[in-house]
Image: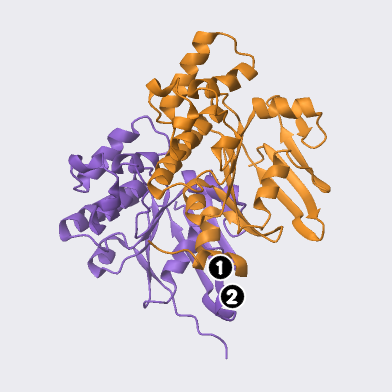
Amino acid sequence: MNTVMLRVEDLAKRFTLHLQGGVQLDVLNGAGFEVQAGECIALSGPSGAGKSTLLRALYGNYRADAGRILVRHDGAMVDLVTATPRQIVAVRRTTLGYVSQFLRVVPRVSALDIVADAAGGRADAHTEAAALLHRLNIPASLHGLPPATFSGGEQQRINLARGFIHGHPILLLDEPTASLDAANRDVVIAMIREAKSRGTAIVGIFHDAAVRDAVADRLYQVAPYQQAA
Amino acid sequence: MSEPTLLSASGLTLRFGAIPALLDVDADLWPGEILAIVGESGSGKTTLLNVLSGKMAPQSGQVMYRDPAGALQDVHAMPAPALRALHRSDWGFVHQNPRENLRMAVSAGGNVGERLMAQGSRHYGHIRAAAIDWLEQVEIDADRVDDLPRTFSGGMLQRLQIARTLVTHPRLVFMDEPTGGLDVSVQARLLDLIRSLVRRLGIAVVLVTHDLAVARLLADRIMVMQRGEVVEAGLTDQVLDDPRHPYTQLLVSSVLQA
């Protein structure tokens, strides 16, 4: 029996740009799909269609204007559209992980600590963090350094380690392989497949068709929203 | 989800003559949480901090604090000695200018130890050991323990103020622009220190800052103030990545990208 981990219903998101004369951009309208445990949905559509906006809305980062985002959290469905900030924090802590395209670097914090901090307070966090960094081909000599000066690809791999270490039952991936070489891309594909086999539900944006074909079970087409005349 | 609040303010209003410093402001803070209050000079954010901490009385509205025994205390109805006792033990206040909090004619160790003594500690050896431990936690060399604060740099003074504030293990700390006026490299060190100490000790913080990057780094939630009103509030990443109010959009778009 399959378990629905995430259900999106009739989701709408409009940006009102007050500094640009109140221009309104209807980016999402009527978006809806569901994701089961162990399933990976790839968001597809042309650049500017709203894929990243949708992914950010699913994380509660962009606040939706209408619709529902139902997330299975602690055995019940929680609607992120109406949840309080503290409920969203709780959902993100244990249920919902997000790997953004870019690492937000904190001064003085080492790569290893950045990853271990995301483990949710597990006793073996540092061991696990080091193992993940090794798997992503970040040499031990870099683990103790703050990643501010690392290359884009290295920062992305640290971000990936940070996103995967907790083992959230739902993972949102925004271009997880964008700045990676072929060898590291294959590592990430393997990590996504392993997460799926553990029952993780995944929603991702994968511009690389080879990666998408290797991990996605279904596509969800994000259509550019046509503004009513 | 129904965890009780540590501090809960409702309907706070305060006018200075015709100028509204606070207009019907509500604020809630839960244990271990960091709430940032952002806005430009004159938006009322420091006034709000002063009213929340009982330093300034509102014309209307209420601030309720849940004490360690779980009882609710009306901060503005408390007898003055009880409020002072709260500020000496359960609460801390970190000023932008550390000289407002430190005693410049007393040694660094004395500044830290004094708050313990005010709480009733009497054993000199314990007080000195705690002072040295806290100096080290804020990255001040233990051999500076007998030096006067006036021999310290601005960044060291700010770290000394933080040691003095945290030595009593407060549950709630009010911070007014703690990194204001410091060099960026000093600021980064201080921010990292505040972030790690507050997380490790599980302290709740109300943080006033005009620097959105500071709020992004430290705060769980954010309140944006303009002319005494809270115009937008939410999770820090929501408010900064998806600002809705015209004033928040102006603040976010005015930040220079380094």
Q: Secondary structure at mark 1?
A: helix
Q: Chain of mark 2?
A: A
Q: Is B109 rendered above or below residue A15? A: above
Q: Is B135 rendered above or below residue A202? A: above
Q: Which chain is orange?
A: B
Q: Position of residue A72 (x, y in %)?
A: 52, 50
Name the residue rendered at 77%, 48% in the picture.
Answer: B10
Name the residue rendered at 25%, 56% in the picture.
Answer: A189
Q: Which residue is mark 1?
A: B249
Q: Quadrant of the C terminus of chain A?
A: bottom right
Q: Is B68 rendered above or below residue B183? A: above
Using the image as rendered, state which of residue B7 and residue B12 is in the foreground.
B12
**In-image side of A35 versus A209 (left or right):** right
Q: Which chain is purple?
A: A
Amino acid carrying label 2: it is His
Which residue in the rendered view is the most extreme toward the bottom?
Answer: A229
Using the image as rendered, state which of residue B90 and residue A4 is in the foreground.
B90
**In-image side of A128 versus B93 (left or right):** left
Name the residue rendered at 77%, 32% in the picture.
Answer: B73
Q: Residues within 10 Å of mark 2 (few under 14, many from 20)?
A: some
Q: Secondary structure at mark 2?
A: helix
The mark tally for this picture is: 2
Using the image as rendered, state which of residue B76 and residue A225 is in the foreground.
B76
Q: Quadrant of residue B203?
A: top right
Q: Is residue A100 shown to the viewer in this render?
A: yes
Q: Is residue B199 shown to the viewer in this render?
A: no
Amino acid carrying label 1: it is Gln
Look at the numbered discs 2 and 1 and tell me whether their residues touch, using CB distance below 8 Å.
yes
Q: Which residue is mark 2?
A: A18
Q: Chain of mark 1?
A: B
